[in-house]
Amino acid sequence: MKLCKCATGYFQVAMVGLAGMVIGSVSSQAATKTVDIIDYAFSPMNVTINVNDTVHWVWVTDLHSSTAGNLSGPPAKDTGLWDSGVSDSGHIFDFTFTASGTYPYYCSYHLFPGTVTVQAASSVGPPTIAITSPTNGADFNAPATFSLAATASETGGSVANVEFFNGATSLGTVLTEPYSVTAQSLGAGDYTFSAIATDSGGLTATNSIVVHVVAATGPPSITITNPANGSIFNAPATFTVGATASETGGSVANVEFFNGATSLGQVSTAPYSVTEANLAAGDYTFSAIATDGVGVTASNSIVVHVVAKTLVNLSSPRFTPPETVQFNYTATSGLIYVVDRAVILGVWTPINTNVASGGSVSFQDSNASGAAQYYRVRQVASP
């Protein structure tokens, strides 16, 4: 059987923009509907198209056919309108429907059914369209390059094409989903983008958005705000690495965090932070790199120390009447230690908190009484 090819007719339609000006012309073009043949089914099994639309069958798996006929047998009743023959994966077959009606068909090898419903274009209402990206009012840094995307549909019919405009300038016509084009290298200014959907009967619908492109005044700035540079943690250490980032006259596209050369993740919106977990003892360099809308970067780094927990040893206790007690205890420089006192063993009261400046700390309690008292020293999480 000779394959039918899609017949295309063109006519000019004046499209009126937001300010009432003509923003272009659109070509009316028949649509194509794709049906995949997978294992033991047509996907989708039932399709609805318009007169002069084409169904495009794609063989995803082996030993299938697209054969016109009513699978009410056995045996199946062929109409002879079309028959692709049995083929394997990778094969494609097109058929253009020139008259309205319901057309059953089936796979002659595996005997599973499908249906094509063809309706007159005159019975179809206008299409619907919505620009999905970018959002209306979006800001970009100059020179701006981004994808302009839309969704379009028509209840009971099909969309022939979607044409995109920057003002009155066409950015291109897309015949099949996904509907998108690229806007490139835009200078500073405000831009109105439109998308016009046209169905196979020539009816149209339009959606527009405004996008702002601003001139960046310089590189971004970034500061790691947590933890503080030089912070000391007990191993295994878990903490949040946070940063602030900004750009005067522009915007920050993302902030990426690093532990040494290893990326901890990229964050596209504030607050900019990631979590680092279960770090063993050692010294670590953390960096945060801010990137603006045009690819200019800035970075900030800190050093964090993670230390292993050690036993605290108390030594050299002495009492100086009437109420002074002194003793020494071992420590790890930079860690926090709390001294507790108890008159009744087990009922502890914290009396001193200290960040150790060395490996040995001398402590003095000037409020001790002559009664027996107990002391202990606790290392707590740092910082």
Image (cartoon, grey):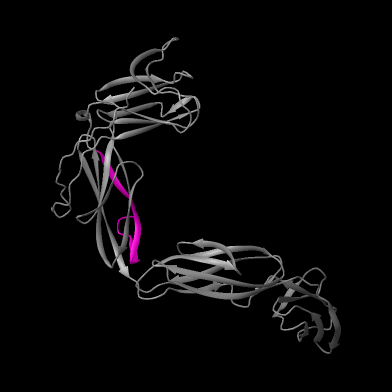
Query: In this rendering, is residue 67 above or below 327?
Result: above
Q: Position of residue 236 (x, y in %)?
A: 71, 65
Residue 9, quarter of picture: top left
- Asked if residue 253 is positioned above or below residue 218 in the image, the reply reads above
Our reading of the magenta stretch's main secondary structure is strand
* Residue 249 on the magenta segment: no
Residue 377 appears left or right of 278: right
In the displayed orientation, state which residue is furthest to the front. Answer: 2
Q: Is residue 230 above or below residue 191?
A: below
State which region is magenta. Answer: 127-148
Tell me which corner region of the image, top left, top right, bottom left or bottom right, holds residue 370: bottom right
Front-lying residue, 323 or 191: 191
The answer to if 128 sits in the magenta stretch is yes
Residue 61 appears at what percent x and percent y?
50, 30
- Where the N terminus falls, by quadrant? top left
Residue under the point 27% across and 50% down: 172
Left or right of 31 in this view: 75: right
- Residue 72: x and y in percent read 41, 12
| Residue 325: % across, % down | 81, 85
Instruction: Say which residue appears at 37% left-offset and 74% top-offset.
Output: 248
